[in-house]
Structure formats: C-alpha cells, structure tokens
Image: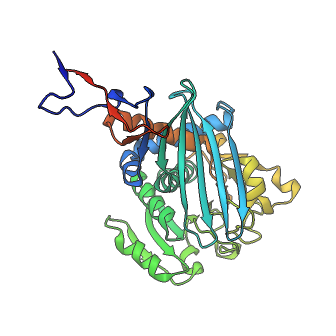
Amino acid sequence: MTFAATHPHPVTPTNAHWRTMSGTEPILMLDREEVRSLLTWPELIDATQRALIDLAEGDVLPSISSQLVVPGASLHLKSGALTEPPIISVKANLRPAAGSTSGAILVFDYEKQRLQAVMASGDLTAMRTAAIAAVAARALVGSEPVRVALIGAGPVAQRIDEALEHLGIAADVRIWSRTHEHATGLAAAYTGRVEHRACQTISDTVIGADLVITCTPSQTPLVSVEDLLPDAVVLAMGADSVGKRELAPGVLDSAEVYADVRSDALVVGECAYLGKESALRVSSIGTVLRAGIGSRTSGRRIVFDSVGSSAVDAAVVGLVMRQAAQQNLGRRFDLDGGAPQVNPTVVL
C-alpha cells in the first residue's frame, strides 16, 4: 500500500528515504554521544587487531599521517581507506600543549565520490587508542591477569582501563597523574572487582608492575628504567608528536621494541630517540599478533610504541558507519543549501 507523505499518521523515515532539494543524498552527522554508543569493546578490539595485522602484512589501502605544528598546539591529520565499506576516513585533531583535543572526522564514499558523513572524533580516538593498547597487552602478556601501572588519568587512560577490564587482563591497577585528584577520581569511579589505587609518585605506581601503560602528553621522561621489572611490558601510548616523551633513556635499551606504525614511530614516537642501529630492531606489532595471543616467551623487557594508525582509524570509522546504518542513528544535513526533505512517497 502507498501513502502520500501528508498521510495523517506520520512515518519515521529510514536513511534511504532522505533526499535533498538537489536530489543528492544528504550527509550523515554523528555527535560524540552517538559515536560512543556505536562502539563496543568486542567489535572494536577485533577490528583493531585485524587492521594491525593487515598493516604489518601490507594488506591495506594507502594512508597518510602528518602533523602541522602551530604555536601552542599541533594539528594531527590521518587519512586511511577501506574497501568494505568503500570509504576514505579523514581525521583532523587539534591537540593543544595543555593536553585537550578538538577535532572531527570526514567520511567519503569513494565509489559514489561524495562526502558521506561527519562525526565527532574525541571518543573514537580515545577508544581506538585504548583498543590498540588492549590488543598489544593481550598479545604481549597473555591471558593471565597481571599487575598494571597506569601513568595518566585522562580520557585515554579511562578507556584503556575499560578495555583491560573487558579482556580481564588486570589483577590490580595503580594510577598516577600529575594532578593527583584525577588519579583518585579515576580509581574511585571504577566499580568492578579489580583493586584500583591512586599513587602519589610514579615510582610507587611502576615498581612491581608487570604491565606499565603511559598515556600522557608529557614532553619530559616519566618512567625510569630503575623502576621497571626486567621483564616488564611497557605500552607507550602518549608520544605521538615531535618533542613528546614518556620513557627515560635506557628503557628501550636491550628491550624488544614494537610499534603500530614503525615508520611514524621512528619520527615522532619513543623510537625517535633511538640511534640508527638500535632503530633496526623495531618491529611491527602485527608480527606478534600473527603468531597468536601470548606467544611472546623471551622474558626480556618489551616496549610497544604506539603513535596511532590511519588504517586502524579507517577500520573503526567503517565499524561506526555500519552500526549507524543498522541502527538508523544520526542526523542528515546538506552543504549545498537545500534543507533535507523526506522522500514525498513512502512505501509501506
């Protein structure tokens, strides 16, 4: 049966019913809360692991990662593409030296050759970073719960704590922040069964920890080699710009070193502080992921240097787009000047 759009009983349109005045499909807009609601840890962690393996094997479409440094901040630009769905993800995040972030993601459909969506990047970036940390932790420390030191207590630290909880990796968690109230707040906000404790010093946080995770915007080293266990696993998640550094000299010495994007880590990550010969021993985390969870058996210290991946960004954006379509979530707008309209005929 067919009804006109003026039928007295309103019909909620699906995304396919929207048309602009010019006849083109309008652009989907997803705000921060909507993006957050579409990301769940099982799907996000699986998508991240697949993307990191594909990245190591060279089985990804071309991507671009660059930074524009301006007074007091840097603009991080990451562009990556997927074949399914056929999208190009372009993320622009402005990161002030103070540590906050403002940004957005443009999503292009390269088959239809149009801008398809605009979405908030804040929670997506934090959760993508946490998913990378969770994937690396699961691969490098195995499935048995371990003692965790969390250096940083901002949004990324919060998401990492959630991801570790999902995987059951932490036996206990100690937290440090430059602002102690942030550390106590993160510890107090936790409602699970794993003990969380805020510490006054980095040493108190790190000593005895099997897994040390740094996620700060620091430009001066925080974690010293003297505080680390000989076989500790260190996930350095914060140094992603020139000048940032969380690990003191010596932490990477004689360690197994992995990176999510090796070429970028050697320029802007902790690996940028390695000499040319030492840089040769930096491997892709994808080589470990291919071997299987908990495959590492050397007993040496391991450092994972994460600078963020355009390929992972694209994979996560693709996940969000699929979920948004399934749940019919988001709003539509038209940059060409015409207000979005419902298709005048709706077939029931």
Q: Is residue 293 visible?
A: no
Instruction: Relative to 206, say whether 258 is above or below.
Output: above
Q: Residue at x 62, y 39 (%)?
A: 80
Q: Residue at x 42, y 37 (%)?
A: 338
Q: Is residue 113 visible?
A: yes
Left or right, 277 with reference to 133: right
Left or right, 165 with reference to 69: left
What is the x, y in percent for residue 287? Answer: 66, 40
**Count the marks: how many?**
0
The quadrant in which residue 295 appears is: top right
Q: Residue at x 64, y 32 (%)?
A: 60
What is the x, y in percent for residue 343? Answer: 31, 26
- Give the quarter of the figure containing the C terminus: top left
The quadrant in which residue 332 appears is: top left
Of residues 26 and 77, which is closer to you in this image? 26
- Give the quarter of the figure containing the N terminus: top left
Query: What is the image's colouring?
Result: rainbow
Of residues 279 and 145, which is closer to you in this image? 279
What is the x, y in percent for residue 115? Answer: 53, 35
Residue lying farthest to the bottom in this orientation: 200
Instruction: Relative to 256, say whether 253 is above or below.
Output: below
Instruction: Relative to 90, say whether 270 is above or below.
Output: below
Residue lying farthest to the top in this orientation: 1
Q: Residue at x 16, y 33 (%)?
A: 10
Of residues 252 and 221, which is closer to you in this image? 221
What is the x, y in percent for residue 32? Answer: 42, 54
Left or right, 97 with reference to 178: right
Left or right, 330 with reference to 283: left
